[in-house]
Amino acid sequence: MVFFFAQSLSILEMARSVSRIFSGFRCFGSLPFGNTQLKTQCPSVLFRTTSERTVVQVLPSIFSRKPRDFSLPNSSWGEEMMRLYNYYNSQSEEATEGQEDHGEQWTRLPSYNRSLKYATGGVYLSKIIQSKARLFTRNIRDPGAAFEYVVFFRQDKQRCVCVFQAGHLLEGPPGHVHGGAIATMIDTVTGTHASLLSAPVMTANLNINYRSPIPLGSTVLIESTLDKEEGKKKFILCSVTSTDGSRVHTEATALFVSISISHLLRG
Ligand SMILES: CCCCCCCCCCCCCC(=O)SCCNC(=O)CCNC(=O)[C@H](O)C(C)(C)COP(=O)(O)OP(=O)(O)OC[C@H]1O[C@@H](n2cnc3c(N)ncnc32)[C@H](O)[C@@H]1OP(=O)(O)O
């Protein structure tokens, strides 16, 4: 079970709220707050509201050693993957000095293969499971074999775009991507989006229409937009298209519900 941790509050409110969220977990005391910049190489978690931009370095401190950021280019990335990565990255420069940042640029979101390492009391997961747990989409070591992706977020438009290169281990129908792998990526992108609004969240509903098959090895765009928010519920729209936009592969709607940590502890 995976949950998202990001928070849509001012930095002080956020520190309090994150403290509540993580109060059951060891290592929280070492979480550093206060970094207000997200650089492309910086392994941070992004916390935003629609009116302000706040970035907090959280993830590295909960790992025993510096975690690898999987959303940076590796040798398996093909030409199209690199072209799109460079395009969105070039749109995500830091605001120049004196210029206020209203989230009008893309921000690359870092991506790691672990969530929290420890839970106190052994009530959540056994120690063995805890040490072996890995994020589903980031647990295959061979670069390019499975899920290669990077997610960018644009706050002013409440939009995420994910550049996804589907590796050979994701085969479903011959030569094409497995529907479950596509669903996984949709869940990941829309879930990341929902978590930027309010976290932690869990997927309550995912509705998918598969329109045309995705060739194995190809690069596609997965885009999510916020449809509406109703209290604890976040409704997100999602599409998977060819990179030139000429072909719709998949369309989906997703519902995420904000939960409390005690919800996870109950199982
Ligand atoms: C920088 C970013 C970092 C993040 C990186 C991480 C990337 C990793 C990405 C990985 C991504 C992986 C992500 C994953 O894989 S998450 C794993 C898959 N999901 C689950 O296992 C969830 C299992 N279900 C539950 O835990 C609960 O049922 C949830 C939490 C969903 C709701 O809990 P609960 O039942 O206690 O909620 P409530 O009673 O307070 O109801 C609240 C409201 O919600 C409405 N409702 C509830 N269910 C549904 C439904 N099915 N359709 C329509 N509506 C529904 C309900 O009517 C009510 O509405 P209203 O009456 O208020 O109007």
Image (spheres, rainbow, N blue to C red):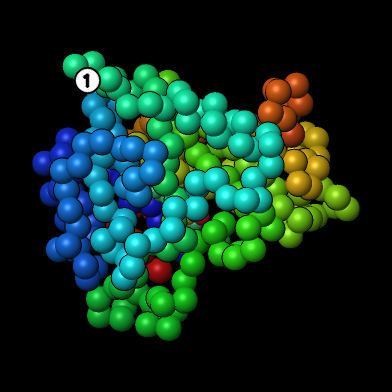
- Outermost residue, front side: 75
Q: Is residue 13 visible?
A: no
Q: Quadrant of the C terminus?
A: bottom left
How would you rate the neighbour count of disc 1 (Cα within 10 Å): few for under 14, some for 14-19, many for 20 or more? few
The residue at 39%/23% (across/down) is 105
Q: Residue 129 falls in which quadrant of the image?
A: bottom left
Mark 1 Cβ and ligand 1 under 8 Å apart: no
Question: What is the residue that sits farthest to the top in this orientation?
Answer: 99
- Residue type, label 1: Glu
Depth check: give the residue in front, 216 or 249. 216
* Residue carrying label 1: 97
Q: Residue 193 appears at what percent x and percent y?
A: 44, 38
Query: Above or below — where is 147 with respect to 83?
Result: below
Query: Residue placed at 62% from the left, 31% from the top?
Result: 83
Report the side of 83 relative to 194 (left or right): right
Question: Residue at point 75% right, 41% down?
Answer: 218
**Residue 127, can we see it?**
yes
Q: Is residue 155 above or below residue 208?
A: above
Residue 23: x, y in percent?
A: 18, 63
Instruction: Give the residue at x 68% y 34%.
Output: 80
Q: Which residue is nearer to you in this view: 114 or 9?
A: 114
In what element is the residue under mark 1? loop
